[in-house]
Amino acid sequence: MSYGFLDALATPGVRAVQAAMGSDKTWANFKGHREFDRIGPQEAAFIAARDSVYMATVGETGWPYVQHRGGRPGFIKVIDEKTLAFPDYRGNLQYISIGNLSTNDRAALILMDYPHRARMKILAHVEIVLPEEQQELAEKVLDPTSKAKVERIILLHLVSFDWNCPQHITPRFTEAEVNEAIEPLIHHVEALKAEVHALREQLASANLTPDSV
C-alpha cells in the first residue's frame, strides 16, 4: 500500500536500518493508504493556525540547514490543495536556505502545535517568487499591515505530508495563549477588588472599620 511520505524518504540506507531494527515488517505489512499528497480541510485549518515553521534544506556540501520562519497566525497560506506559500522577510543576510534551494529545490518542513502536542511534517519542492512578478499571488500571501521587508515569496509544491506521534512533544504556550487562558481569572480578581473597595466605602460611611465588625 502507498505511504507517500515514507516512500519518498525510504532510501536503501533507511531500509537497511529498518531491517536491522526489525521495523521493516511493520511497514511491509502496512495495510493503510497514506499518500497524503493533498491538503484537506483538517490540514488547512492546522496550517492557518500556525505562527511559525521550521524548514530544512540541503546545500552543495551535503550539510542540512534548518531555518525558522515566523509571522502572525495564518502567515502560511494554502493556495490550493497542492500548494502553500509564505512571505520570506529580510533576515541576517546569510541567505543559506535560498542558496541551498537554488541548487536543490527540495525542502522538509515541520509545523508545531505545542499546546495540543501536534506536529505536521511536509515534503515539498520550493519555487522562489518575487512579489512584483506575481501580483495576484502576492495579494494572497502578503500582509498589507506588516512593515517588515518582504524579499520574496516561498512557494511550496506539496509532495507529501504526515503527522507525528505526540508522545514526546512538550506542551508550550505563547504569551497570547497564556493571556487568553488567564483572562477570566484577571476579570474575576478585578471584580473581587471592586467588591472589596465597595464594602470598605460602605464601612467607612457607617464609621466602621473591618476590625470592628
Image (cartoon, helix red, strand yellow):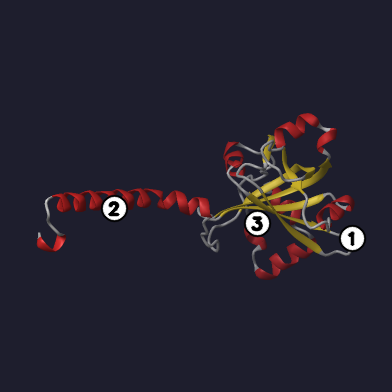
The amino acid type found where label 2 is placed reads Lys
Reading the image, the residue beneath label 1 is 60
The amino acid type found where label 1 is placed reads Glu
Is residue 106 toward the left or the right of residue 49 in the image? right
Circle 1 — which element? loop
Pick whichever of labels 1 and 3 is earlier in the sequence: 3
How many angstroms separate mark 1 from mark 3 (CA)?
Answer: 32 Å
Reading the image, the residue beneath label 3 is 27
The amino acid type found where label 3 is placed reads Trp
In this rendering, which labeled residue sits more in front, label 2 or label 3?
A: 2
Given the current orientation, which residue lies at the most extreme bottom position?
Answer: 20
Asked if marks 1 and 2 touch (Cβ < 8 Å), the reply is: no
Is residue 138 toward the left or the right of residue 39 in the image? right
Circle 2 — which element? helix
Pick whichever of labels 1 and 2 is earlier in the sequence: 1
Pick whichever of labels 2 and 3 is earlier in the sequence: 3
Circle 3 — which element? helix
**Place of residue 22 in the rendered image (x, y in percent of width and height, measured from the top left):** 65, 67
In this rendering, which labeled residue sits more in front, label 1 or label 3?
A: 1
Which residue appears at 17% of the width and 53% of the height? 204
Which residue appears at 12% of the width and 54% of the height? 207
- Note whether 62 is above or below 100 in the view shown: below
Reading the image, the residue beneath label 2 is 193
